[in-house]
């Protein structure tokens, strides 16, 4: 049940169609088994790369498609509607490591990593959070010390999506050992590859949802990272990460919209098939009201998402829009999947029906890439900043 909030070009409709067909052929037949077994299908990476879906925002010079944000999110929404576990792989890869290297990397780093990432030969991951540094990410403790021609990293990274299978990991570490202040400065971004001595994959999390997407800890024990793998300035990595999170939040918003849309579609179909009191339950006003509310939430979230994407494509600042879209879409996903389970009744609570998986997958969208609480903080700060700018423009000239 897709009603696009923006007029789409023929190219955008074609990519949307290709994504839907790929999902139907390569994802839908396997998603229940992948979820049940918490299984990551490695061949999907190359298949997504063959379609260009892992380099949608990269220039053609680096074997990317050079597409706009709206087109990328249309494809991501379709993949996420089929399986949010595959959606988060596509989102993180496109939004964070590839974009950080593109924006802040040296020419050599771009040539070395981006073409392979665009083709699906190299899978990207992002390592910011730590066991004691979640929403307060600037309090991270992983330390990087320059030793000749390499940086030596020690610490533990948590909640790393695809970390056990990633080939290129953007990892944040504190570069200034004398600066113990919490804040954006004194943290570097490093391109870590799993072949480096001192790298190991730690605990794999046994998650409620997104079970086909591995989430792991990464352990750095005297990990020697070549100095050439430092991204940009040694004290600016955290700033790079925060600036890139706007991209990540749009990706998670698209994932959440895909989850919610799928739950709505299943609920509408089921309500037409399920008979109670001698008629389909969609004829009951209680069910009608629930479906109407679900549909309104999905469409409102989609409108915010693509409004933010269009603003980004116009070159406008999107921090406010991205946080609003992520907040609205994630809360819509949780509400809509909860209502979908209710429409199904007892059948919604068992694994034989798809809304049970969607219900589990939805919750994390309110947590990662910034919790809903953090999104509200960001939105409030942006409102205050806008008010200050507006107020200063109204002051009389002196």
Image (cartoon, rainbow, N blue to C red):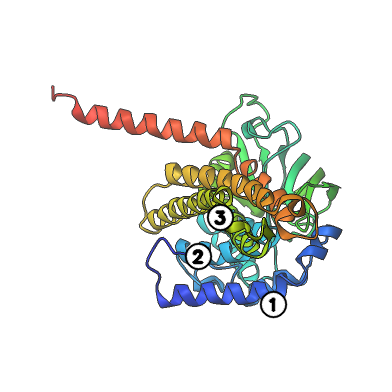
Which residue ends up furthest to the front in the rendered image?
278
- Tell me: 89 left or right of 330: right
Residue 169 location, x and y as percent? 70, 54
Q: CA distance from mark 3 to mark 2?
A: 11 Å
Q: Who's the residue at 57% across and 77% down the image? A: 18
Label 2 or label 1, whichever lies nearer to me, is 2
Q: Which residue is mark 1?
A: 25
Circle 3 crowding by C-alpha within 10 Å: few under 14, some 14–19, many from 20: many
Q: Secondary structure at mark 1?
A: helix
Return the disc, 3 or 1, that comes first in the chain's sequence: 1
Residue 253 location, x and y as percent? 55, 51
- Tell me: 397 left or right of 309: left
Q: Secondary structure at mark 2?
A: loop
Q: Which residue is mark 3?
A: 257
Residue 302 location, x and y as percent? 48, 55
Residue 132 location, x and y as percent? 73, 31
Q: Who's the residue at 58% across and 66% down the image? A: 78
Q: CA distance from mark 2 to mark 1?
A: 20 Å
Return the disc, 2 or 1, that comes first in the chain's sequence: 2
Closest to the observer, 385 or 100: 385
Q: Who's the residue at 78% across and 40% down the image? A: 156
Placement of 134 over or under 240, stated as above or below: above
Q: Which residue is mark 2?
A: 2
């Amino acid at each position: 049940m897709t009603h696009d909030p923006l007029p789409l070009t023929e190219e955008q409709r074609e990519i949307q169609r290709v994504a839907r067909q790929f999902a139907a052929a390569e994802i839908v037949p396997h998603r229940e088994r992948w979820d049940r077994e918490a299984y990551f299908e490695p061949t999907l990476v190359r298949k997504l790369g063959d379609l260009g879906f892992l380099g949608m925002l990269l220039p053609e010079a680096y074997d990317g498609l050079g597409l706009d944000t709206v087109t990328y999110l249309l494809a991501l929404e379709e993949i996420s509607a089929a399986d949010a576990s595959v959606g988060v792989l596509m989102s993180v890869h496109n939004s964070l490591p590839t974009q950080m290297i593109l924006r802040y990397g040296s020419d050599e780093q771009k040539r070395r990593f981006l073409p392979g990432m665009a083709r699906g030969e190299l899978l990207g991951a992002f390592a910011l959070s730590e066991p004691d540094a979640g929403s307060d990410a600037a309090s991270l403790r992983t330390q990087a010390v320059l030793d000749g021609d390499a940086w030596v990293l020690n610490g533990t990274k948590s909640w790393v999506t695809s970390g056990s299978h990633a080939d290129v990991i953007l990892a944040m570490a504190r570069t200034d050992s004398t600066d113990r202040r919490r804040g954006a400065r004194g943290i570097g971004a490093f391109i870590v590859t799993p072949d480096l001595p001192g790298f190991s994959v730690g605990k794999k999390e046994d998650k409620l949802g997104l079970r086909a997407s591995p989430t792991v800890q990464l352990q750095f024990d005297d990990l020697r990272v070549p100095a050439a793998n430092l991204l940009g300035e040694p004290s600016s990595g955290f700033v790079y990460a925060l600036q890139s999170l706007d991209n990540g939040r749009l990706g998670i918003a698209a994932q959440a919209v895909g989850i919610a849309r799928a739950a709505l579609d299943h609920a509408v179909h089921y309500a037409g098939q399920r008979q109670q009191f001698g008629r389909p339950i969609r004829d009951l006003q209680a069910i009608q009201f629930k479906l109407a509310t679900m549909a309104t939430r999905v469409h409102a979230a989609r409108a915010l998402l693509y409004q933010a994407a269009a603003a980004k494509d116009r070159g406008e600042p999107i921090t406010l829009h991205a946080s609003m879209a992520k907040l609205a879409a994630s809360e819509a996903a949780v509400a809509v999947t909860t209502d979908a389970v209710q429409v199904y009744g007892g059948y919604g609570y068992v694994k034989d029906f798809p809304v049970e998986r969607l219900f589990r997958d939805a919750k994390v969208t309110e947590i990662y890439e910034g919790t809903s609480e953090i999104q509200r903080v960001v939105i409030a700060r942006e409102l205050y900043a806008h008010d200050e700018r507006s107020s200063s423009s109204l002051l009389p000239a002196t």
